[in-house]
Amino acid sequence: MDGFYDDMEVRSTLQRETDNNLRLSAMVDAACRRSVQVREMLAGLKLKPSDIASVGDLEKLPVISREEVVELQRQEPPFGGLCAADVDSARIFTSPGPVYEPHLGENELWARGYFAAGFRKGDRVLNTFSYHMVAAGLTFHEGLRSVGATVIPSGTSGTETQVQLIRDLGVTGYTGTPSFLIAIIRKAEEMGHDFKRDFRIRRASFVAEPLQPSLRKSFEEEYGIDTYQMYGATEVGDIAYECSEKGGWHVCEDVIVEIVDPSTGRCVEPGQLGEVVVTRLNDLFFLLRFGTGDLSSMIQDDCPCGRTARRLSGIAGRVGDAVKVRGMFIAPSQVARVREAFPRVTFQVVVTRESYRDILTVVVVDDEEYSAVGAEHFGDLFSGVCSVRIDRIETVKGGLYEEGKPLVDRRGWD
Ligand SMILES: [Zn+2]
């Protein structure tokens, strides 16, 4: 499974930066000619196209959410002025909202992700994403074709049909959600098959749903399926993908990803948690700075696989579920990681404000389990996972606030 899909994956950081700046400038120029929305936005901000000449200049523009795209398109159907009204695209997709998007056919959506997951010519891959209306089925299909695989467009057919296809066609790979693959495996077992022994599926690429570590372990160890994750959004296509190191997701070569503080629209410090904001470099659909609502951080270290693109650390949760403490996000998933480390300790994170300063308190039930762990060890691990320092650890004998919610925000805003 060595090698790379193409040279773009191993560009130097400087080369990628230079390329992205040039491509962004070209995109903004094209947007000013073809997108009423971008033209009016820049005029409103008193910016010329040349003011957006580098990735760093993107901070001058607002982040646009899915809800805002829906509203723009509702006001000015079908595309909300985000592309030319007479756009020449092979297909127009729609997704719930509704959001209308022209298909961005020129670039190789998802291909590098499938390549990194080891899909090649000779593979027969079950594509269980819908081919109806939405972009998923057809764009994943094309990605698989780009790496030479044969695709079985099984779409949303029932699990029994999927099992039949896997058996009859000697399917070697799967793409879809993890929950659907486990449902297919359960059905196969119900039908009397031994999934690992009877079938040839050895590789799966998941997208559109988080892959729980326990389920991953089960796929890999019990069923002999090597698993990979890809990450994308219907509005912008693929955003990042996992390589064989499985330690973070490489940012795709055709997108610019910023990790942004949603309250200011500015990028957070390297390594910190923030909203994933995406700009897909293309010349059809001019969605600049799309806010996914997902929380992640950028891993600073190089990846041993040799790909030079930075990696996202996975998705820590949704922006709305996180709590911001002294400018840093804490997501419920981070608290869950602390809980995994200390499964017997009962605790809750409470944020309050004293003299205009955010105070982070961890309320811990004072019992034998907690005594065994010790306050110092607990505090160190917590700060390591959440990258925010604990102000105090408060021990209680009885119950926690608000029925044991992992994260409680008790700050008033008056
Ligand atoms: Zn890698």
Image: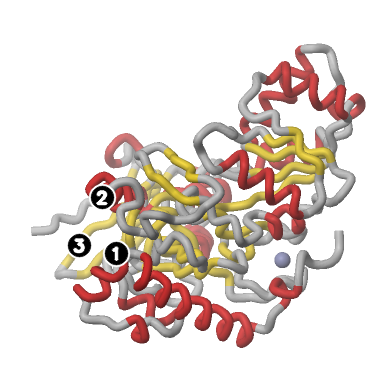
Left or right, 332 with respect to 327, comes to: right
**Which residue appears at 42% of the width and 84% of the height?**
53
Three-letter residue code for mark 1: Val
Residue 232 spot, x, y in % from top left: 54, 52
User: Which mark identifies residue 49?
Assistant: none
Label pair 2/1, CB-CB below 8 angstroms: yes
Q: Residue at x 71, y 24 (%)?
A: 184
Judge whether 130 appears above or below 108 on screen: above
Question: Which residue in the protein does label 1 denote?
Answer: 36
Which circle marks residue 353 in the picture? 3
Q: What residue is drawn where x is 30% and y is 48%?
A: 73
Earlier along the polypeptide chain: callout 1 or callout 3?
1
Query: Where 365 sits versus 53, above or below?
Result: above
The residue where tag 2 is placed is 76
In this view, the residue farthest toward the top is 191
Q: Quadrant of the C terminus?
A: bottom left
Residue 103, percent across and down? Answer: 53, 51
Please provide percent x and percent y for residue 334: 48, 54
Q: Are marks 1 and 3 in contact (CB under 8 Å)?
A: no
Residue in the picture at 73% in, 18% down:
161
Q: Position of residue 180 (x, y in %)?
A: 64, 29
Q: Is residue 94 left or right of residue 65?
A: right
Q: Residues within 10 Å of mark 3 (few under 14, many from 20)?
A: some
Note whether ligand 1 is within 8 Å of mark 2: no
